[in-house]
Amino acid sequence: MAWKIFMGVLLTLVIVLGIGLPMSPHPQTWYELPVIPGLEEKARIIFFHVPTAWLSTLAFLTSMAYAIQYLRKRDPLDDIKSSAAAGLGFVFCVLATLTGAVWAKFNWGSYWNWDPRETSIFVLLLIYGAYFSLRSAVEQEEKRAALSSVYSIIAAVTAPFFIFIMPRIMTGLHPGAKGDPNGAGPVVEFKMAPPMRVIFFASLIGFTLLFIWMFRLRVRTAQLEQAHHAKG
Amino acid sequence: MEYTDIAGAMRKNKKVQLKGAWAKEKQSSFDADKRQFTFWLVDDSGRECKVVLDGAAPNNFELATSVVAKGRFTEEGYFHATEVLTKCPSKYEAKAEEVKKIS
């Protein structure tokens, strides 16, 4: 319980400070964020967009972990957990796509121009979209659990390629792409002013806790639904 | 549409996304009658070409670390763009000198 309150406070602070802290060309105090020429207020997206994408990645990996667990022990609960995590991953992947597209309109000049980063997240959405098609196509529960477990593992193996590799070895507009003057290639140089860094990492922790909370809720509701169905 | 350089854009006879940076030392201008913005683009290989954009220069054009021009090469030898996208810096720190230059 205490950790949920902590999460609530943390995310509230991230939202209030992330949106509310003043920006100054020459930050004098600890609470002033720097003005980044060309980004200005739009820089605030990093507090929400990156943690959203992070939550999505974490969820896909969690889905894979429970998929492996299912194939080893054949416990239906592991299948519930694997699909619950994949669902959250998909939702937050959509959110990362939408926040990115809106931001791109105002910073790059177009909602969508098939930048490698946009192409790769689109492919990722297709991959995980197919996961749910697969689940709804198989009636028999054990068969569905086994098939979707295998699929989740394969999907998660390809995911790092679309998240970390492809958008970084190709030239693009997204930070970290090849040709980015501030660090290209798989290893991105991390440059961020101290107050931004604090909010950014607080947000990452907050979103991680949010994932754990939403994941548990989803697993519990899925269990209740199943019990309800079993009773008839 | 994937990104390409000048050589790649010249080879293809269709709409491409030409990626490079604004060659600031060369003349850029806005033709108010035709409503066209003309500038020079230098690609990653260092080759330069003239770009004519339908419309005004996009937001952040002076600050962009790189630009993407959507369009194709014309027979007159310049790149005719219908849209120009801009890449912003990805460093989340203030840099005193850069800020001074702008203000």
Image (cartoon, coloured by chain):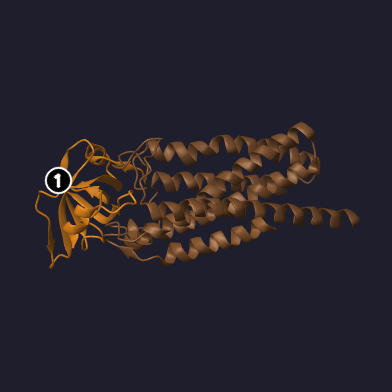
Chain colours: A brown, B orange
Q: Nearer the viewer, residue A68 or B12?
A: A68
B103 sits to left or right of A74: left
- Residue A195 sits in which quadrant? bottom left
Q: Residue furthest right?
A: A231
Residue A45: image location, x then y, percent: 42, 58
SS class, disc 1: loop
Badge 1 is on which residue?
Answer: B77
Q: Is residue A145 left or right of residue A14?
A: right
Dot 1 amino acid type:
Gly
| Frontmost residue, B84 versus A213 | A213
Residue sitting nearer the eye, B84 or A197:
A197
Question: B99 or A29, which lies in front?
Answer: A29
* Count of numbered circles in the view: 1
Q: Is residue A148 above or below residue A214?
A: above
Q: Where is B3 relative to A50, above or below? A: above
Quarter-of-image position of residue A155: top right
Residue beneath the point at 25% across and 40% down = B5
Image quadrant where one finds the C terminus of chain A: bottom right
Tell me residue A79's x, y (percent): 74, 43
Q: Residue at x 38, y 57 (%)?
A: A104
**Residue sitting farthest toward the front:** A29
Circle 1 crowding by C-alpha within 10 Å: few under 14, some 14–19, many from 20? few
Residue positioned 73% across, 52% down in the render: A219
Q: Position of residue A173 (x, y in %)?
A: 34, 48
Dividing the image into 4 quarters, which one contains the N terminus of chain A?
Answer: bottom right
- Residue under the image location 35 percent in, 63 percent down: A41
Which residue lies most toward the top here? Answer: A72
Residue A192 left/right relative to A63? left
| Chain letter, disc 1 residue | B
Q: Is residue A131 left or right of residue A92?
A: right
Estimate the x, y position of residue A231 in percent, counting from the top left: 90, 56
